[in-house]
Image (cartoon, rainbow, N blue to C red):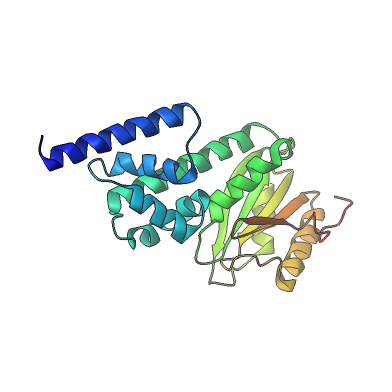
Amino acid sequence: MNKLEDKASLSLGHRQRLRQKFLAGQLSDSEIVELLLAYAIPRCDVRPLSRLLLKKYGSIHRLLNAPIDSLMDNSGVKENTAVLLKLIHLITKLDYKEVLESEPIFHDIKTLENYCRCALGGKSIEEFHILFLDAQFRLIKDQLHSSGTIDWAAVYVREIVKTALDLNAHSILLLHNHPTPNTCFSMQDIDITRKVEDALAQVDICLYDHFVVSGDVVYSARNLHFLDKKH
């Protein structure tokens, strides 16, 4: 056996051990990324790359939320690998969305927060979304309301009310992101929250909450007492 064959044999043995550890639920974060990368890069030792990616992005969540261009800026990450990572991210988001469509969103607040992180985590510009809910507080539709700049996205109150009426929504949840980590609601965010709440109240639609995704944190306007408690 030559050196290349010997190296390939060791790599196959290592990956088999990783699969066995996965089946036993014993993988570390670095090993999870390593096993995932192995399916995109089949004949290469991906341990250094898995460590590099986790060090750069800080967590598996941030790695999967990273834009595809950012992923491909890393040496060793080609389009095939980046697409696989983003596919895992998309599947995760769709899984959370199916739960929100099938049962009241307050039944599992963690699933709701994780869905919001998947939808907006890693975005380099602000996006404003409207989550329209039925009478049982199940998700009807997640609508991208607007895309803006690094620190601003437009909000059109009349359009929100009109769409809510068209969809026969019982309530809505406002959702937007702050690309800068660990930044909570701005005064402008609080002001628009109250304007939307007042406009919806005129047509008997409830503003359930307003979430801001910033880094790994999801801030709630209701928990921070920015919403009228009577709704």
Q: Nearer the viewer, residue 33 or 109?
A: 33
Left or right side of 229 for 128: left
Residue sitting at x 37%, y 58%? 71
Residue sitting at x 40%, y 44%? 87
In the figure, 47 relative to 189: above or below? above
The reply to whether residue 166 is in sight is no
Residue 59 lies, in percent from the top left, at 51, 52
Residue 81 lies, in percent from the top left, at 32, 48
Residue situated furthest right in the rendering = 230
- Picture quadrant where residue 187 is located: bottom right
Q: How many marks?
A: 0
Residue 22 lies, in percent from the top left, at 44, 31
Q: Nearer the viewer, residue 45 or 189?
A: 45
Residue 200 lies, in percent from the top left, at 77, 55
- Picture quadrant where residue 134 is located: top right
Q: Quadrant of the N terminus?
A: top left
Left or right side of 103 for 30: left
In the figure, 103 relative to 156: above or below? above
Residue situated furthest left in the rendering = 2
The reply to whether residue 38 is in sight is yes
